[in-house]
Amino acid sequence: MGKYLLRRVLQMVPTLIGATLLIYWLNFALPGDPTAGRCGDRPCSPTYIAWFNHEYHLDQPFIVQYVLYLGRLLHGDLGTDFYSHQVLHELAIRYPTTIKLALIAVVFEAFFGLLAGVWAGVRQGQFADSAVTVATLLLISMPVFVLGSLAQLGIGIRLGWLPVTVSSRATVIELLMPGIVLGALSLAYAARLTRTSLVENLRADYVRTARAKGLSPARVVVVHTLRNSLLPVVTYIGGSLGAMMGGAIVTEKIFNINGIGAYIYRAINQKDGVGLVGAVACLVLIYLLVNLLVDLLYSLLDPRISHE
Amino acid sequence: MSETVLARPARRIDRPRSLGGDAWRIMRRRVLFWASAALIIVFVAMAIAPQAFTSVDPRLCDLALARRTPSSSAIFGYDSQGCDVWARTVYGSRASILVGLLTAAVTALVGGLLGLLAGYLGGWVDAILSRLADIFFAIPMLLGAIVLMYSIPSSSSSPMIWLVAKVVLAMVLFGWPSVFRLMRSSVIQVKPNEYVLAAKALGASPWRIVSSHLLPNSLTPVIVVSTIDLGGYIVTESTLSFLGVGLPDTVMSWGRAIARASDLGLIRQVPHMLIFPSLFLCLTVLSFILMGEVVRDALDPKLR
């Protein structure tokens, strides 16, 4: 296990370097002016541009720039944003809200996704199965911003069940609707995956044996089949974090939540390149780490995976 | 004489059906296939010739008509600027469908070609391409596309095709690894088969091995995934446009239309401005996803 862990971590190093290099290159080496927007609507003064180029080492060769950038990144320095605030500090203020939102989304996704998937899988070919298939297809074809706006219109304004926007306190009740909206797409995929994997496993020999032994159908499904069927679903739920990060930008904009997503949205619209790239780089790092954790968890859950 | 007469029908039965022909026989029996095909045809027709669906000029807006609800003169009503929502929705289909089709095609081409190279050649080519794919795969598509779109500036006077190409490029850059991995693994599965070894032993050129053995036998998953992903690309494009980094307001698109309608005050007062573009967007995505699933069911014998 230790060896496997080490290999997995080492494998991640080139990916990490490549991903940060790519993001860095996208921001500073592409034709756009990195100082655009940093001085309001006016173009920046030559002194400011000179200072900026020096501060971000843009006067150095590209590879030197990148290595210096990586060094800053490792020290937790993501640069200073539009308001001369440390990007890392700004993210640190906002992350509890985003984590709360993501947790609500994941809990919702995992619970209802599994429930719907198991329901459809057990009743394969019956009404429940078709109903879940249709519902998940509808959810998949609905972009997060459409679902969010429609939820505001339907549940928030017309029915008045849940608050339409989130205050600065960001209570769980306020975050309930945004969380559900954020988790809905992944829920649909999780349900379909659970169903497929359950149906596949229900055909296996060991399930037939368990049935032949006279075990109750519930025990056959829950104890014998579900444990094996859930493995791909666990990986998927971990990996769905990547889609959620994009979704969080949209959800936080729509519901006026002051989290990391809203910070990115603000950075886009105020042309705050340093803030945008800093926040995105941070999210990509988190995404990679979570994927690593999921991989390790997977190998713990499934002893069949060899660590050699 | 009698022998030839007998042989003729036998030959007709034995003639092997191609994979495509086989899939077609299965697909044409399914209602879902015809339903999604009909929807796709309607939307593509709308994208090609929007003027056939509406006689109203979508850019002709009259503030006096602003926020009018649907009526017989404008079946989807008017938006907050007094533009005809039906006309704008019809014209908006072009950007979404163009972006979706182009992205799916280019991603399949780039990812497929590189995957074929990596799977066929192996060795250091495979090692380099696979690591490269890992890097691009590590960045969630929407996040990467936001940074890329942000970094390549374009003025609103740029021609539409350049604006569309930029969005396509952003999505292809972060979308090719999944096609690459798929193609690579299916080429690696096909390569050690006896018929490929036999062709090699008979002195077939690499080009012949690839074009007549590897490619036809490993293309199926790429086709299936590309069709299903097409819907996803339309979603990503509209999300980028919604966030303000995708297509600008000068290009009529569903993403921008929904972004303008999703202002809370407008949702309250002019909900039809939100509902109709959303409906078209979702229906388009749905029809492509359904089509992809029907194609998958027909092409993948394991699921039958």
Image (cartoon, coloured by chain):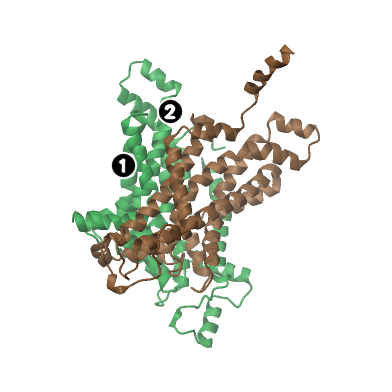
Q: Residue at x 41, y 18 (%)?
A: A209
Please state the horizontal and vertical placement of residue B129, each as a whole percent of the image: 64, 51
**The C terminus of chain A lies in quadrant:** top right
Q: Chain of mark 1?
A: A
Which quadrant of the figure has residue B261? bottom left
Of residues B76 and A181, the one nearer the viewer is: B76
Residue A261 in sight in this render: no
Please state the horizontal and vertical placement of residue A283, each as a whole percent of the image: 44, 59
Q: Secondary structure at mark 1?
A: helix
The circle drawn on residue B179 is: none
Residue B97 in sight in this render: yes
Note the chain letter of the brown one. Answer: B
Please state the horizontal and vertical placement of residue A106, each as a whole percent of the image: 34, 48
A184 to the left or right of A69: left
A174 vs A237: above or below: below
Neighbour class for label 2 at 10 Å: few (<14), some, many (≥20)?
some
The circle drawn on residue A201 is: 2
Q: Secondary structure at mark 2?
A: helix
Q: Residue at x 62, y 70 (%)?
A: A62
Which quadrant of the figure has residue A167? bottom left
Residue marked by disc 1: A112
Chain A representation colour: green
A262 vs B2: above or below: below
Comes first in the chain, label 1 or label 2: 1
Q: Residue at x 40, y 45 (%)?
A: A237
The amino acid sitting under disc 1 is Phe
B216 vs A148: above or below: above
Of residues B45 and B92, the one nearer the viewer is: B45
Q: Chain of mark 2?
A: A
